[in-house]
């Protein structure tokens, strides 16, 4: 579990999920963590973080307006100078192979995050991992 990894490194860990089971498991693995049950489009943790990490989630947000709302929430919770790490299933073109999946392209992410004022950080394999820094 990602939260457990960051906690083992000494990070102050918070997490958001809509699944009560996932939150219960996270709390068992990271007893000092803060975990909130909330949709990603509306979560509010009342603070900013140096690292915001989002893995294999955003392609499940099929509506583009909701997807941008989630990105805005992630940015809002990132400290100035902090980084957002997104691990995602980027595709050469947008597609929706199932009713609960919408794959977006790297240029779609780049455009949205640049519009939000973030600076792209170079990564070795941008087809899976995106790193953006808040100035």
Image (cartoon, grey):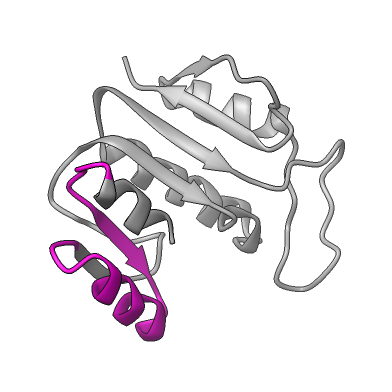
Q: Name the quadrant containing residue 16.
A: bottom left
Q: Nearer the viewer, residue 92 or 32?
A: 32
77 versus 33 height, above or below: above
Q: Is residue 33 left or right of residue 76?
A: left
Q: Name the quadrant containing residue 84.
A: top left
Residue 30 colored magenta? yes
Image quarter hosting the C terminus = top left
Which residue reaches farthest front? 8
Please state the horizontal and vertical placement of residue 13, each as a whole percent of the image.
23, 52
Please state the horizontal and vertical placement of residue 48, each as a whole percent of the image.
19, 39
Image quarter hosting the N terminus = bottom left
Q: Is residue 61 left or right of residue 116?
A: right
Q: Nearer the viewer, residue 7 or 92?
A: 7
- Residue at horizontal 28 percent and vertical 39 percent from the top: 76
Q: Name the quadrant containing residue 91.
A: top right
Which residue reaches farthest bottom? 21
- Residue at horizontal 57 percent and vertical 31 percent from the top: 130
Please state the horizontal and vertical placement of residue 81, each as a whole percent of the image.
27, 18
Q: Which residues are magenta?
A: 9-33
Q: Nearer the viewer, residue 17 or 41?
A: 17
Q: Is residue 3 left or right of residue 70?
A: left
- Residue at horizontal 44 percent and vertical 51 percent from the top: 70
Residue 53 colored magenta? no
117 versus 21 height, above or below: above
27 versus 123 height, above or below: below
- Residue at horizontal 31 percent and vertical 47 percent from the top: 6
């Amino acid at each position: 579990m990602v939260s457990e990894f960051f906690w083992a490194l000494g990070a102050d860990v918070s997490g958001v999920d809509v699944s009560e089971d996932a939150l219960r498991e996270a709390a068992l693995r990271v007893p000092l963590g803060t975990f909130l049950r909330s949709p990603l489009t509306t979560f509010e943790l009342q603070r900013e973080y140096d690292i915001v990490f989002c893995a294999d989630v955003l392609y499940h947000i099929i509506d583009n307006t909701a997807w941008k709302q989630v990105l805005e929430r992630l940015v809002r919770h990132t400290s100035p100078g902090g980084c957002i790490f997104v691990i995602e299933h980027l595709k050469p073109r947008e597609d929706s192979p199932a009713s609960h999946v919408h794959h977006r392209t790297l240029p779609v992410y780049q455009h949205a995050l640049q519009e939000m004022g973030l600076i792209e950080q170079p990564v070795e394999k941008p087809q899976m991992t995106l790193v953006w820094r808040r100035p």
